[in-house]
Amino acid sequence: MRIFHFRLSAQQMMSKARKVSSAMERDADLLEQYGVTAEQRQDFAEAIAAADALADDVISRWYVSEAVAARDKKQEQIRAKIEGMVLRVRLCFGAQTPLIGVMDCHNLSQKNTSELLESCQNALAVLSENFAALSVFGLTQPMVDELAAARAELIVLADAVTDAQRERMEMTLRRADALNEIYETMVGYCTIGKLLWADVNPAKYEDYVIYHTKPKSAPAMPENNTKSDAGENM
């Protein structure tokens, strides 16, 4: 999904906007002759400062990665706890007991968060219903309580991941809106700036150039066939 209206990177566009803003202050008197007021120049500079103050995607991405890491760590803890419970169920009721199917604890490593939460809930139900028999094989109430608490913590951590991802997207869109607005405004000012300095001052004209067109490469020269032609004529 393309969210920026310009071909530059966000960093390049903002760098150019700062240079244009500086050039506009230098050329303030000339720009006023074209209707660019001091208030407009100030608004442009303030828009750039406001966009700079928005969190960069690197920061938002870090928050997401931290949330994901915390969630994944808790999931690993739950998998280990459930596997220990499954072992007790097998020892108590036999390797082929249908209770394993009720717990739905096959391929735990491949289950996503919602699937793992469901398996955890199923396991808790089986453990509670068969607590007396399983206690002979080392199951204690604190173990069951710890698994239930871990499941509750995973729900919170999963929500934190969703919140971080949503906040990242919202911040990305806010920054994109701000940068697009700066770019659209800058294009108009650069059009005026280039009119001021075209054929007058190349350096100042360059201050208002956003994109530089690459020179077309020269067409390939035809191969020199003099020798082969001469050989054919011999």
Image: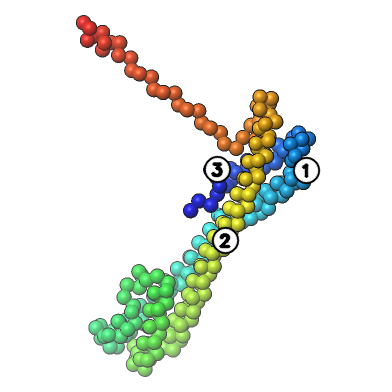
Q: Are marks 2 and 3 in contact (CB under 8 Å)?
A: no
Q: Amino acid at mark 2?
A: Glu
User: Residue 207, image x and y in percent?
Assistant: 65, 34
User: Residue 76, image x and y in percent?
Assistant: 42, 71
Q: Amino acid at mark 1?
A: Ala
| Rendered residue at 44%/23% (across/down) | 218
Marks 1 and 2, how far apart in space? 32 Å
Q: Is residue 84 left or right of residue 44?
A: left
User: From where the camera sits, is residue 98 visible?
Assistant: yes
Q: Which disc number belongs to residue 170?
A: 2
| Rendered residue at 44%/81% (across/down) | 147
Q: Which disc number belongs to residue 38?
A: 1
* Camera-nearest residue between 204 and 66: 204
Q: Is residue 135 left or right of residue 74?
A: left
Circle 3 or circle 1, nearest the eye = 1
Q: Which disc number belongs to residue 99?
A: none
Write down the quadrant of residue 81 in the picture.
bottom left
Q: Amino acid at mark 3?
A: Leu
User: Residue 107, image x and y in percent?
Assistant: 32, 72
Q: Secondary structure at mark 1?
A: helix
Q: Which disc number belongs to residue 8?
A: 3
Marks 3 and 1, how far apart in space? 27 Å
How many circles with numbers are drawn on the protein?
3
The quadrant the C terminus occupies is top left
